[in-house]
Image: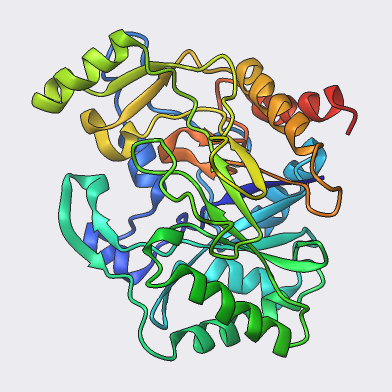
């Protein structure tokens, strides 16, 4: 069983963020300035034993890997940003790759979407546009090849895993799959294990043809919301007047299945919590009454489903290891300490892993 956690590399200053949001901006900037927006709203969240770290510190990266491994997380999926040859937030993973440390498995997820100012109330402002220029596939693949060949790189069915965040945004998804598989074969990798992200911005399935387009699997990303009639009414009111936000939803009690109409292999992804108000304030959404115990239930259900797949392809993904400004993280915090990590250990043990 590969139990991976998505890993955000946004916790160090970069020139672009300095220009867009002010000197020294990192994701911690949003986390620290968050405020409670309704009675019982738990903001700001405060990190626990790792503190407000910088991912440029190799000791921090080693401590993260040790914490993850101790809980039964088997790898990190590092978000990778490639805009027609230009990269962002690349330094933490580059250092992991070049140094060989930590000795903890990983794979990559290409976050192939344009960056806008949506998190800061300026959705019409394009900061970095995602593009697919001629010849870019080969240049992109060649750049990633040293990572694919690293002995720590996660493989399913013997092939390196690559997650695509916005498969529907690819100009020709089937052509993309064909091209990348051919390049991987030529490079002696035996192909890739290509996984399509199956979550839409409205928390539904945004892409239903992963099997027909040749992807090896889809990743169904479950947002932990129960959209009750009361919650829907509040959402409608909020859409007309932001002062009634953020949208609030009960944390769901059970993990729904992906639509039976979706063909092919579908892996599961679960989240411990959701609260993106540190980024979006009253335009955000909050899962109410989340807890490590409820997350453990979701993860146990996801693992039980994953055990039905062939053992060589089992892949379950937690969103996320460190998305602090979205409220979904496994790292220790001030309130629950290592509670989220204990939930992972308990869920694994409950299904015999």
Picture quadrant of residue 49: top right
- As drawn, 344 above or below 106: above
- As drawn, 236 above or below 110: above
Foreground residue, 225 or 11? 225
> Which residue is at the far right?
352
| Count of picture labels | 0
Q: Residue 152's x, y, as percent? A: 79, 66
Picture quadrant of residue 126: bottom left
Q: Residue at x 38, y 27 (%)?
A: 44
Foreground residue, 155 or 198? 198
Drawn side of residue 327 relative to residue 67, left or right: left
Foreground residue, 171 or 118? 171
Quarter of the figure with the C terminus: top right
Q: Residue 97's x, y, as percent? A: 68, 73
Q: Residue at x 49, y 83 (%)?
A: 137
- As drawn, 239 above or below 175: above
Coloration mode: rainbow
Q: Residue 299's x, y, as percent? A: 68, 28
Foreground residue, 311 or 46? 311
> Which residue is at the far left?
240
Quarter of the figure with the N terminus: top right
């Amino acid at each position: 069983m590969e139990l991976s956690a998505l890993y955000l590399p946004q916790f160090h200053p970069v020139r672009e963020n300095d220009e867009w949001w002010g000197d020294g901006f990192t994701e911690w900037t949003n986390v620290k300035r968050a405020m409670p927006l309704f009675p019982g709203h738990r903001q700001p969240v405060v990190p626990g034993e790792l503190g407000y770290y910088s991912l440029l510190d190799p000791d921090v990266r080693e401590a993260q890997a040790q914490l993850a491994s101790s809980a039964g997380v088997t790898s990190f999926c590092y978000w990778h940003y490639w805009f027609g040859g230009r990269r962002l937030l690349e330094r933490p993973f580059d250092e992991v790759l070049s140094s060989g440390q930590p000795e903890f498995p990983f794979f990559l997820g290409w976050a192939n979407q344009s960056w806008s100012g949506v998190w800061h109330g300026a959705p019409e402002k394009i900061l970095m546009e995602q593009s697919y220029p001629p010849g870019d596939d080969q240049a992109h693949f060649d750049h990633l090849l040293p990572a694919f060949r690293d002995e720590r790189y996660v493989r399913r069915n013997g092939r390196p895993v690559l997650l695509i965040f916005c498969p529907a945004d690819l100009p020709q998804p089937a052509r993309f799959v064909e091209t990348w598989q051919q390049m991987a074969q030529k490079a002696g990798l035996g192909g890739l294990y290509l996984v399509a992200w199956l979550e839409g911005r409205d928390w539904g399935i945004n892409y239903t043809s992963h099997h027909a387009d040749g992807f090896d699997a889809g990743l169904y990303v479950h947002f932990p919301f129960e959209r009750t009639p009361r919650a829907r009414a509040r959402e409608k009111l909020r859409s007309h007047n932001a002062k009634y936000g953020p949208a609030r939803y009960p944390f769901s009690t059970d993990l729904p299945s992906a639509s039976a109409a979706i063909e092919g292999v579908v892996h599961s992804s679960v989240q411990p919590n959701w609260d993106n108000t540190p980024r979006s304030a009253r335009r955000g959404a909050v899962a109410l009454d989340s807890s490590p115990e409820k997350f453990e239930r979701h993860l146990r259900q996801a693992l039980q489903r994953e055990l039905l797949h062939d053992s060589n392809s089992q892949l379950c993904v937690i969103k996320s290891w460190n998305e602090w400004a979205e409220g979904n993280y496994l790292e220790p915090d001030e309130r629950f300490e290592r509670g989220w990590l204990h939930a992972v250990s308990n869920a694994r043990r409950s299904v015999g892993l």
